[in-house]
Image: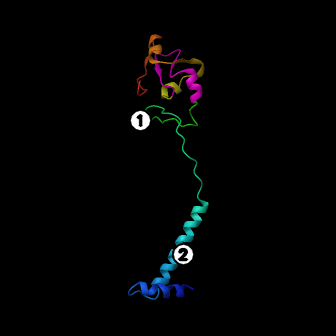
Amino acid sequence: MILQIAKKIKPLLPSVDKLTVPLLIILASVAGFGAVRLWLIWPAKSPVAVEENAGFAGIGEAVKTKSSVNTENQNLQGKYVASKNGKSYHFPWCSGARSIKEENKIWFNSKGEAEKAGYAPAGNCPGL
């Protein structure tokens, strides 16, 4: 069968050896078979969903993903957080805010509220 295909293709290719055309056909067949096998076993990817802009992430900080940020809870509590025992306020995703115990957190809806309460912007929280 391969030789019959080679005879049909040979007039189209000038000065080709007897083995070149059959080898090219076999190579193309194996590559096609391998590509189909990979396509069938390749894992399906789920679509990427962007929830909201989590702000600027500085060096060493990771931007929170949909699964690691409870945005509904943050919206109910406020946009800025401070500690009862501290002197500075943070964005909820900053490293300083993540180290505050839940029972010590104070939430503010604006920078003005936090500053009126006597808190200053955190130096390690980019964008404040």
Q: Nearer the viewer, mark 2 or mark 1?
A: 2
Q: Is residue 105 above or below residue 32?
A: above
Residue sitting nearer the eye, 62 or 38: 38
Residue at the spot 54% in from the left edge and 41% down from the top edge? 49
Which comes sooner in the sequence, label 2 or label 1? 2
- Residue type at mark 2 is Ser
Q: Give the residue number, with chain letter if any, for mark 1.
A: 59
Amino acid, disc 1: Ile
For the point 54% across and 75% down, which residue is it? 29
Secondary structure beneath dot 2 equals helix
80 displayed left or right of 76: left
The image quadrant that residue 14 belongs to is bottom left
Label of residue 84 in the image: none
In this view, 11 is above or below 39: below
The residue to which callout 2 is attached is 29
Examine the structure image and report whether residue 58 is included in the region drawn in magenta.
Answer: no
- Magenta stretch bounds: 71-92
26 above or below 64?
A: below
Where does the N terminus fall, quadrant-wise?
Answer: bottom right
Give the x, y percent position of residue 3: 53, 87
Is 81 within the magenta?
Answer: yes
Question: In x, y percent, where is residue 110?
Answer: 47, 18
Q: What percent of the width, then of the height, locates residue 20?
A: 45, 84
Comparing 101 with 64, the one in front is: 64
Q: Residue at x 51, y 23 (%)?
A: 79
